[in-house]
Image (tube, helix red, strand yellow):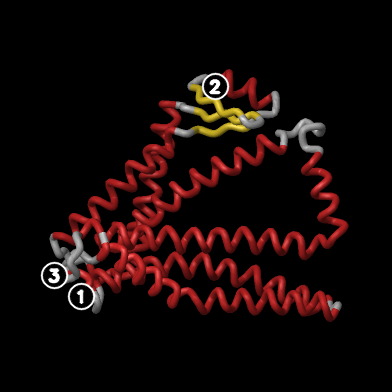
Amino acid sequence: AMMLGKLIKNDIKTGLYTVANVYFAAFVAIAFMMFGVLAKSGTIKVLSSVALSVIMVVILVFTFFAVISMFNKSVYGNVGYLTLTLPVKEWQIVFSKTLTGILFILISYISFITSNAFLFVYILGQKGMQTVIELWQQMEIMGLPSRETLELYLIMKSLTGLIAVFFTVSSLIIAVSLVNVSGIDKFGTIGSILIFALLTGFLTSLANKIGKMINLNMVIYGKSVVFTFSNSFVARQNELGAMSFELSRYFFLIVFSLCLCAAATFLIKKRVNVK
């Protein structure tokens, strides 16, 4: 357990060094935005806003490739020999890399959402935000889902988002492992991305189809949560201002993710990259 903790700590530290520069660029853009407000310069405000938007997209893409690169280098690359001689099990290596990948992709998503919210406030100004707050408070009167309903819905969707991130990272890890199998390792990063795209497309489609067959829905109304298999009940509740989504497909995404991690552990154990 102690060695696993050290491995996770080292993976997080390596990840921080990898992504530090792009986040620094984002902070510089935000600093220029603040300067634009103080200097009352419309040009600086527009340019810094565009720069932040571009940097946030770069962060998302860069993090995606960073997860691929970190796993590939530390398990199958030059330092792979050192990683595989550590006194830890193969599943612990996969666990550490998966946890680190989830952490950094989550940070990139949260940064993206936060920066967009910041840009929204920045562009609207004080009067615009006051209007948004008033609309938010009057949602139920306008026939929209209540604030309590929307808040709980967003919390639940955030949890399903975490499952989706777990699925994404486990798919990346198995894609990198498969492309390192001796004989097909010449395809490199492009091969990893292709396998990832095909795998996630197939498994996501399969999870959605099974989910529709099972049709377990979560219905949220105010602070109450109801689980149902009835489409008519869901439709009636949605007309009354409830919010809902199909739940069982996320269970299968968890199952698929665990299977992909197990497959990656097996491939590492078999030293598939050794010719």
Nearer to the camera, 190 or 107: 107
| The C terminus lies in quadrant | bottom left
Residue drawn at x 59%, y 68% is: 56
Q: Which residue is denoted by mark 1 in the rendering?
A: 82
Instruction: Give amino acid for label 3.
Output: Val
Nearer to the camera, 213 or 66: 66
Which element carries disc 2, helix, strand or loop?
helix
Q: Are marks 2 and 1 in contact (CB under 8 Å)?
A: no
Instruction: Give amino acid for label 1.
Output: Leu
Which element carries disc 3, helix, strand or loop?
loop
Tell me if 135 is positioned left or right of 4 in this view: right
Q: Nearer the viewer, mark 1 or mark 3?
A: 1
Earlier sequence position, callout 2 versus callout 1:
1
Give the Cα distance between marks 2 and 1: 54 Å
Q: Which residue is denoted by mark 3 in the rendering?
A: 274
Tell me if 153 is positioned left or right of 2 in this view: right
| Residue 137 percent across, percent down from the top left | 79, 41
Q: Are marks 1 and 3 in contact (CB under 8 Å)?
A: no
Give the Cα distance between marks 1 and 3: 15 Å
| Residue 73 percent across, percent down from the top left | 29, 73
Residue drawn at x 42%, y 68% is: 65
Which element carries disc 1, helix, strand or loop?
helix
Q: Which residue is denoted by mark 2 in the rendering?
A: 231
Instruction: Give amino acid for label 2.
Output: Asn
Residue drawn at x 38%, y 42% is: 253
| Residue 205 percent across, percent down from the top left | 41, 41
Earlier sequence position, callout 1 versus callout 3:
1
